[in-house]
Image (cartoon, helix red, strand yellow):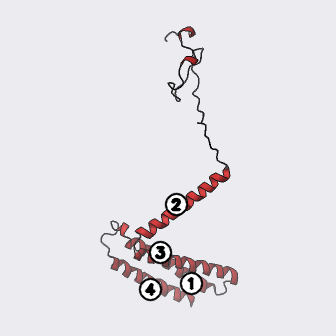
Amino acid sequence: MAPKKPASTLPPPSSIPANTAKPNQAVSSAAGQPTKPQNKPAPSSTSTSPSVSSIKKTSDAQQIAIGVWNNYVDRTPQRTKLLDSFLLFLVTVGVLQFVYCVIAGNFPFNAFLAGFSATVGQFVLTASLRIQTNPENKSDFEGLSHERAFADYVFGSLILHFFCVNFIN
């Protein structure tokens, strides 16, 4: 081990300019012992209260939502927007069916199950059609034309509704 230098050979801490000391390095004390680095936050001239920061977060969330909506409107093809509106309609119908079942009762329970199953099944088939016809997914469905995807959608919808009508009795 190397011998320690006497404290008298070290310059006093006051003679070291503050701008030459790095904030992440340990600063030596007058006794020659290293001290822990001091991580003091920089003084700020403005202090934010919790209500101001929550308002800022709300406005940031609104800006993000507006940006997502503008990006959706600008970049999404009309065919995909049409499928999205039909998906929104199916979600609304499913929620209304469920609320009606809760409020008015489900006396013909098989009718409720058939209607709700048709709504959920049609949602799944439409979401599948949206994925297959989305131009951004063209590399995933190279061998599948839009017409073939739509024919599969129609065929699946016919089978779904055939079973739902038979389930009602």
Q: Secondary structure at mark 1?
A: helix
**Which mark, residue 84?**
3
Distance, label 3 to label 2, CA atoms, is 20 Å
- Residue 10 percent across, percent down from the top left: 54, 12
Give the residue displayed 36% in from the left and 69% down from the top: 135
Residue of label 2: 64
Front one among 144 and 15: 15
- Residue 128 percent across, percent down from the top left: 43, 73
Are the residues at dot 4 and dot 1 in contact (C-beta closer than 8 Å)?
no
Q: Is residue 157 left or right of residue 38?
A: left
Amino acid type of the residue tagged 3 in the rendering: Asp
Comes first in the chain, label 4 or label 3: 3
Q: Is residue 4 above or below residue 22?
A: above
Residue of label 4: 158
Residue of label 1: 115
Distance, label 4 to label 3, CA atoms, is 21 Å
